[in-house]
Amino acid sequence: MIKVVVVGGGWAGCAAALSAAKAGAQVLLLERTDLLLGTGLVGGIFRNNGRYTGAEEAIAMGGGDLFVAMDANARHKGIRFPGHNHASIYDVITMEPLVKKILQNYGIEIKTNTRVVNVIKYGKKIQKLVIDGGNEIKGDVFVDATGTAGPMGNCLTYGNGCAMCVLRCPSFGPRVSVTTQADVKEIMGRKADGSFGAMSGSCKLSKDSLSPEIRDKLERDGVVILPVPENLQKIGSLGKKACTQYAIAEYAMNLVLLDTGHAKLMTSYFPIEDLRTIPGLEQARYEDPYAGSIGNSVRYLGSAPCDHTLKVEGPDNLFCCGEKAAILVGHTEAVITGLLAGNNAVRHCLDMQYLELPRTLASGDFIAFAHEQMQSETGLRMRYTFSGSVYFERMKSMSLYSINRAEINERVKNVGLNDIYNECLV
């Protein structure tokens, strides 16, 4: 039986594992920490702006399991906040065990607390992965979903220091890129000023540390917007953010809080002494990152060179997804690339033609556009997402953005990809 090994249990890795299992493979998912979902443990936003289109395309293609789970676990639906419409927010506290159960129901073997540290190759083919302790794991084909953040040295060098974020490098060891261990030179994204990396775009606050008035409004409406005094506004820090869809003036002039189960603060970091001068936040406390007053995790320091099928250049049997596949932002974007990588990993073992999503679909155009833009210095300073910035503008200009489910289904049907991820290939 075909054995697919997926390294990294974030949204992208979970989607890749799911897709490969539905295509008929035996799947092993390896995760460095003790929890799945990665930054999805502190994220929560989906279906906002063009992400609605992306999610519905995936559902129409038969890859909707994870989006259905997000919908079922949503705390709020159809909310608006600066620059974003019809957003849903899932509960970050209860999402992970739900996803884990879904994967297990498909027969996927999940090994947490398992950190890959090396790769054993024969020629251009990866044969085994080496994990902490020296044990080896064999596979026929591999998917690198290790992301682009960490190890701690990157946050020290390119950020404001290790902020003890949800990645928990000190506890579980630093992230190791399978692509790098396979002797492939990775691509480094840039901040707006040209320096490497970008800082994660939000922090989370304990709801119990907010005033009762703010907490009640947040749980009722899903969003609270608090004006920031002019002397505390930090317009210049917006260029450091990974999430350029939130790098607009409204996010410097206001504190935007979203109800994800915790209070999601839409800024990369904010000094605690300043935060507590704002009415209602006098007792505010960061939940993640613990050093949210000075910094956050730094990302985009290790994307793999790959084609639009998400086959990594170099090794014969390595695919990638999530931030490893492009300088992308968001759970929706990660899931879409994961679904494609997992399906193509199985196709590789069967000598089938790889699936490349057509550019008449937002998903296909998104992947191709991001790859094209990353060929230039300017493009490496951008981040690509369905929810804002340069790609959402492109979506609208090309009439790819839609919230009409029937219209999206028809587009997928017209290119012959309806239910493609539900087909058993083996």
Image (cartoon, rainbow, N blue to C red):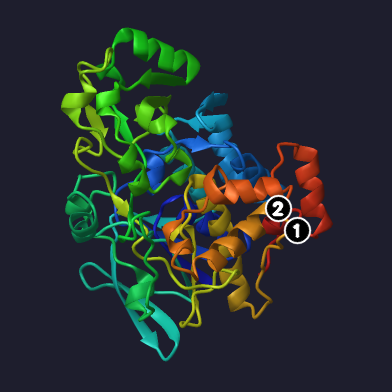
Whichever of callouts 1 and 2 sits on the residue coming sooner in the sequence is 2
In this rendering, does residue 72 appear at all? no
Element at badge 1? Answer: loop
Q: Which residue is mark 2?
A: 61
- Tell me if mark 1 has few (under 14), some (14-19) or many (20+) residues whose alpha carbon lies within 10 angstroms of its own: some
Q: Nearer the viewer, residue 194 or 273?
A: 194
Quadrant assignment, res 94? top left
- Tell me if mark 2 has few (under 14), some (14-19) or many (20+) residues whose alpha carbon lies within 10 angstroms of its own: many
Task: Please indicate whether residue 263 sits to the left or right of residue 421 in the image.
Answer: left
Q: Nearer the viewer, residue 237 or 264?
A: 237
Task: Please indicate whether residue 280 sits to the left or right of residue 45 in the image.
Answer: left
Tally the numbered discs.
Answer: 2
Task: Name the amino acid type tagged 2.
Answer: Met
Quadrant, the C terminus? bottom right
| Tag 1–tag 2 contact (CB < 8 Å) | yes
Residue at 52 percent across and 59 percent down: it is 16
Quadrant assignment, res 364? bottom right
CA separation in Å, label 1 and label 2: 6 Å
- Number of the label disc, if any, that sits on residue 238: none
Q: Position of residue 8 (x, y in %)?
A: 39, 58
Query: Considering only vertical position in the picture, is 231 above or below 48?
Result: above
Q: Nearer the viewer, residue 238 or 307?
A: 238
Residue at 32 percent across and 8 percent down: it is 212
Residue at 39 percent across and 62 percent down: it is 189
Task: Name the amino acid type tagged 1.
Answer: Leu
Q: Which residue is mark 1?
A: 417
Q: Position of residue 225 (x, y in %)?
A: 41, 20
Element at badge 2? Answer: loop
Query: Considering only vertical position in the picture, is 263 above or below 56?
Result: above
Query: Going by the picture, which residue comes out furthest to the top?
Result: 213
Residue at 28 percent across and 49 percent down: it is 297
